[in-house]
Image: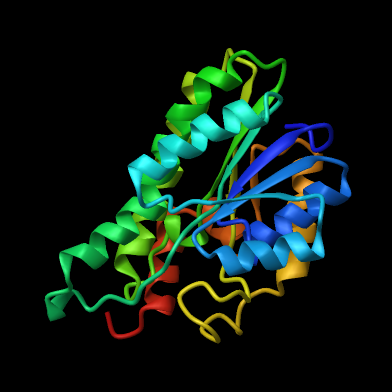
Amino acid sequence: MKTQGNTVLITGGASGIGYALAEKFLAAGNTVILCGRREEKLREAKAKHPGVHTRVCDVASSEDRVALAVWAGKEFPDLNVLINNAGIQKRVALTGSPAIASLREELAINLEAPIHLATLFIPLFLKRREAAIVNVTSGLSFSPLAMVPVYSATKAALHSFTLSLRHQLARTPVSVVEIIPPAVDTDLGGVGLHTFGAPLREFTDSIWEQLEAGSQEAAYGMAAEASRASREQLDASFQRMNPGA
């Protein structure tokens, strides 16, 4: 995908990886639209970068997703890049009768939303000379962390969907890119839970270089290793991450 001259919509773009990517696209001269559930975070992003556009949207809601697509298509006729970045991560004890509403929220945001948004924007993107759908998955797509079972499963499914989407769009103007993060020092899952992760700036700099080079899979650190690992290596990785399993 090209990294300049785009109009880019980033879900979950007011914080974490989404916001860091937004700053990269802004610095490269792109038009950037951020959507997210927290209006106060969007206002903070707008205050720091007045040129950014924002929209409050809960991607867990199918109605909000449809409204987002309609609004974006009308307000930004040159829109040509969708970055499905929004995600939540919950520690779930499967033996503790977790509430179905909580499970559904994680499924909706992490998996249903990117699939639905892709299908909503494909008709628009097929009219472009160049377009891209970028899905943010995880190193846990390949070797799950058992304490976050739903998150790991949704990212594995999104990785699979991304491969199928790329295949179906292979002869179209729409590129399909996968960003595969390891644990990154953001507030995903809760404040202070990922301080052991890769520094956000270091991660984003590496991902940006890979996007500029035209990579269809942009991975970093342990996630890059996992994405190319053998079954035996993944089994060993699972045992390391989930001792006593």
Say whether residue 47 is visible: yes
How many numbered marks have been drawn onto this rendered protein structure? 0
Q: Is residue 35 left or right of residue 7?
A: left
Q: Quadrant of residue 99?
A: bottom left
Q: Is residue 186 above or below residue 113?
A: below
Q: Residue 139 appears at what percent x and percent y? A: 51, 60
Q: Residue 161 appears at what percent x and percent y? A: 41, 37
Quadrant where the C terminus lies?
A: bottom left
Quadrant where the N terminus lies?
A: top right
Q: Is residue 136 above or below residue 234?
A: above
Say whether residue 221 is visible: no
Q: How is the image coloured?
A: rainbow
Q: Residue 114 appears at what percent x and percent y? A: 44, 42
Q: Is residue 213 above or below residue 222?
A: above
Q: Residue 241 appears at what percent x and percent y? A: 42, 77
Q: State the residue at coordinates (37%, 75%).
A: 239
